[in-house]
Image (cartoon, coloured by chain):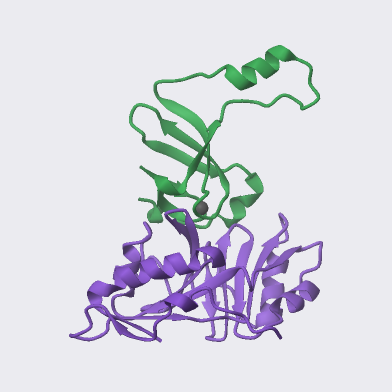
């Protein structure tokens, strides 16, 4: 397989930064999934698509708009009616879904090279993200596993909560470095570490 | 101004794009009825009060929405998917509304 280069690389500086004298309250990293796939069901075929997601990933989608789940290796969440984002540490997810999602059920779009996945974690993750997005990051409003579609200055973002204080943000690869820089600046005040 | 997207819940208006007057009815593309086309392009009710509008949640789930907005108060009294067959995926409860 071809080595995939990170768009963040020139601005990805491992170590502690900002105001970290009193401790690091934000961890930033790139999760670099091998596969990122977008699935869309034709009208009325949503249940079959959800069944296909379960058969390929073994992840069960909870009921509800924006519902999702993650086992730490594979992740899935709804981002629009009948539409889902699935990520996997391994490559080959698009090929697996191309078999499971027949043309009668819906569509499979391989975004593995089109999106960059940035993970923000730590006690101040909600605080920093609230500076970017006008959505409610509190745990009761945004439960673990759930996904949200939103935007920051026209940079479209899909966000999945993968822990009580951990979020995975999927942004367009071409915007990723700019978004990463903004995320680093926003994290300076609380002290952040890039891993 | 907040618009409560049936899929995403209450979101700031900056995430939405206005797609025009929701009262218009587009003539058949093959229609030669110029009066109907003229009405579609130019005629507007311009009410001082509740107004049917089409909005897209362009910075979110990207669905198109039928919104009733009061042009005097900006109060939004109803939001629904333009596509009726999306209704089954609108599971946000009333108590989630802002
Ligand atoms: Zn929406």
Q: Which residue appears at 46% of the width and 76% of the height?
A: A10
Report the number of discs: 0
Q: Position of residue A163 (x, y in %)?
A: 42, 80
Residue B47 horizontal side relative to residue A87, left or right: left
Q: Which residue appears at 51% of the width and 30% of the height?
A: B52
Residue A127 horizontal side relative to residue A109, left or right: left
User: In the picture shown, does residue B66 fall above or below B42?
Assistant: below
Q: Nearer the viewer, residue A102 or A5?
A: A5
- In this view, which residue lies farthest toward the front? A10
Residue A64 visible within the image: no
Q: Position of residue A70 (x, y in %)?
A: 53, 80
User: In the picture shown, does residue A111 fall above or below A55?
Assistant: above
User: In the picture shown, does residue A123 fall above or below B23?
Assistant: below
Q: Position of residue A22 (x, y in %)?
A: 18, 85
Residue A74 horizontal side relative to residue B34, left or right: left
Q: Which residue appears at 60% of the width and 42% of the height?
A: B82
Q: Which quadrant holds the N terminus of chain B? A: top left
Chain represented in purple: A
Q: Position of residue A85 (x, y in %)?
A: 60, 69
- Colour of the chain lettered B: green
Q: Nearer the viewer, residue B44 or A23?
A: A23
Residue A42 visible within the image: yes
User: In the picture shown, does residue B29 fall above or below A120?
Assistant: above
Residue B91 horizontal side relative to residue B39, left or right: left
């Amino acid at each position: 397989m071809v080595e995939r280069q990170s768009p963040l690389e020139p601005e990805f500086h491992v170590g502690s930064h900002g105001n970290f004298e009193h401790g690091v309250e934000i961890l930033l990293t790139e999760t670099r999934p091998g596969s990122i796939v977008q699935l869309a069901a034709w009208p009325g075929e949503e249940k079959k698509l959800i069944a296909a997601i379960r058969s390929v990933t073994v992840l069960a989608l909870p009921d509800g708009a924006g519902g999702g789940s993650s086992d730490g290796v594979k992740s899935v969440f709804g981002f629009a009616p009948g539409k889902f984002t699935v990520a996997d540490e391994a490559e080959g997810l698009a090929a697996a879904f191309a078999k499971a999602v027949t043309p009668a059920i819906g569509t499979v779009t391989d975004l593995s090279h089109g999106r960059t996945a940035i993970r923000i974690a730590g006690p101040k993750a909600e605080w920093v993200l609230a500076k970017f997005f006008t959505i409610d990051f509190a745990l009761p409003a945004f439960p673990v596993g759930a996904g949200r579609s939103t935007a920051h200055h026209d940079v479209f973002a899909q966000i999945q909560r993968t822990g009580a204080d951990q979020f995975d943000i999927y942004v367009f690869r071409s915007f990723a470095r700019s978004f990463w820089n903004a995320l680093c600046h926003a994290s300076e005040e609380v002290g952040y570490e890039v891993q | 101004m907040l618009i409560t997207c049936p899929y995403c819940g209450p979101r700031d208006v900056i995430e939405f794009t206005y797609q025009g007057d929701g009262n218009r009815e587009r003539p058949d593309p093959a229609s030669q009825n110029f009066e109907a086309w003229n009405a579609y392009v130019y005629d507007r009710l311009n009410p001082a009060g509740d107004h049917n509008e089409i909005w897209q949640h362009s910075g979110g789930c990207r669905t198109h929405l039928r919104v009733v907005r009061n042009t005097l108060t900006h109060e939004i009294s109803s939001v629904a998917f333009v596509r009726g067959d999306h209704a089954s995926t609108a599971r946000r409860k009333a108590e989630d509304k802002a």
